[in-house]
Image: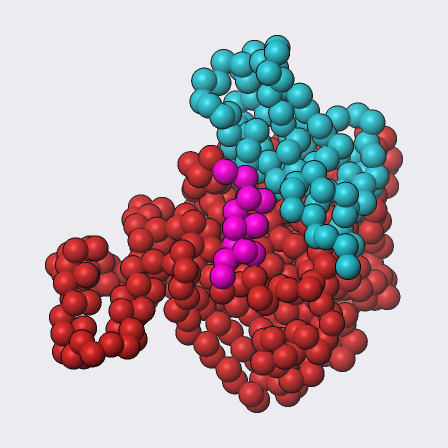
Chain colours: A red, B cyan
Amino acid sequence: MDEEFEVLIIGAGPAGISAAIPLARAGFEVMVVERGEYPGSKNVFGGILFTHQLEKLLPDALENAPLERSVTRRRFAALSAENEIAMDVKVTPWRDKPYNHTMTALRGRFDRWYAEQAEAEGVNVIPGMMVSELLVENGRVVGVKIQPGDEEFRAKVVISGEGAHAFLARQAGLMAKELPKRHMITNVKEVIGLPKEKIEDRFLLEANEGVAMEYFGEAVKGYFGMGFIYSNEESISIGIGLTVHDLIKSKQTLNDMLEHFKNHKTIRKLLEGGEILEYSAHMIPEYGYNHLPQMTMPGLLLVGDTAGLINGSVYHEGTNLAMGSGILAAETLIEAKEHGLDIGSAEALAPYRQKLEDSFILKDMFKFRKIPDFFNKFPHYLRDYPGHIASWMEEYFTVSETPKADIEKGILKKIKRDIGLWRFAVDMYKVGRAVR
Amino acid sequence: MKENPKTIEDKLYLLTYRSDHKSHIQVDQEKFKADKRNPKPITYICPAKVYVEDPNTGECIINHENCVECGTCHVVSPEYVTWFYPEGGKGVQYKLG
């Protein structure tokens, strides 16, 4: 094929589509190639879409997009074998627009709708096309090779929103050849159908309100990872994720661990009577700020998961960083064109990284930059503390004739035995510094 | 109400696939056999049980048509697993995701 496209985007996910829309509005000729039979057919996430970037592009998205429930309740829990201790945050004003920009979603529905919005703006979205390699000439990406058919598409600039595996970014040398076992997280998830009323009763929700619940400790048998439950309109998404490093160490299947989580005494009642509708698995690249890939090379920009843009702190944000990076990639190209630059040149693409740094995307990732390495270096936090804390709390609230003062002494003794007072103090100081 | 599936095999029945006759996965059998870890990680890390060690030959049986495309396998054992996306339009099709 001799035709040269102006901008070719790989992947019709949140990152790619968020780049496509502003580019099309600015008069660029944009083509998006997607390997799935329809956009969304390969895409999986836990369940929350933070919509502030989406609303920037599509101000009516909260009315029109196929979103599930507005999250008014966020809950973080540590599980031990038999117990649970949780922090539960309920903010009732979040039930009103703009819903704290936090909606549960199902990607098969949302991504498909989102790509249709781009098409309505003049973007050419072509599903069923998998990019097998980048075409590189003289150190510049000049196009892609498509499967099936070995067809070559040339473009002035390629935006890769290929997803977590970043095969093409690795091929281009923008990151290490092998993906890091300690920073790649594999998640398995089930969508379990339940009637609306059951969901609202069980999770203490008004109509259209949703909950986001995250679980540490026994939920993933103390490994580096977590379990989650997110409520959709007529289903809940439940899953677990572990770093590949810990998954190898566990010598178990994720499915066995998910069943273990689902059957925990504090969880199983939440799922009762539900019907499993879908089982899925997906990876998250939680490199953290200190291990990000190079974001550009001549002819190529990385967006979304491909660029490792995940805020893996308690916030667990991803799709909004993906959308934000797409918008900034588009902005970079639009400004380059306005300045009369060759839009694929190094000079044209150079501002992209700084735009990411100046936005919430890398500001937040920078703030939490120590977290991925910290929990890898000190696995005992996730392995030991959730269980210990749950058992200390059990003791604290156990009713008997033992004077409360003695109970407190007993707990202190337990802390000494389980961890050691000095070590406990040091641990708390260190984790405080790491997440601050 | 019918019983919910519990095993990987039964859960995979919930999924729709567009079958790709060409496998998108290759395993270097010699290097697989030389991996002395027991069990070999790719036989349990795969959420779709794509990789099974043949008890007779010691070779890796690859059920590529089960693949749910998470790609964990090539992160776990890049030294002998070559995993790439199935051809455009093929493979698993998530409806919910």
- The secondary structure that dominates the magenta segment is helix
Q: Does the magenta run of residues contain A415?
A: no
Vertical arrangement, residue A68 with respect to residue A378, above or below: below
Residue A376 as seen in the image, left or right of residue A1: left
Residue A196 as seen in the image, left or right of residue A414: right
Residue A413 as seen in the image, left or right of residue A258: left
In the rendered view of the protein, which quadrant contains the N terminus of chain A? top right
Vertical arrangement, residue A146 with respect to residue A16, above or below: above
Residue A345 location in percent, x, y? Answer: 62, 47
Q: Is residue A105 visible?
A: no
In the rendered view of the protein, which quadrant contains the C terminus of chain A? bottom left
Residue A318 location in percent, x, y? Answer: 57, 60
Residue A414 location in percent, x, y? Answer: 19, 61
Vertical arrangement, residue A218 with respect to residue A367, above or below: above
Range of residues picked out in magenta: A252-265
Q: Is residue A121 visible?
A: yes
Residue A131 location in percent, x, y? Answer: 74, 38
Q: Residue at x 30, y 63 (%)?
A: A391
Front one among A176 and B83 = B83
Front one among A362 and A38 = A38
- Give the residue furthest to the front: A401
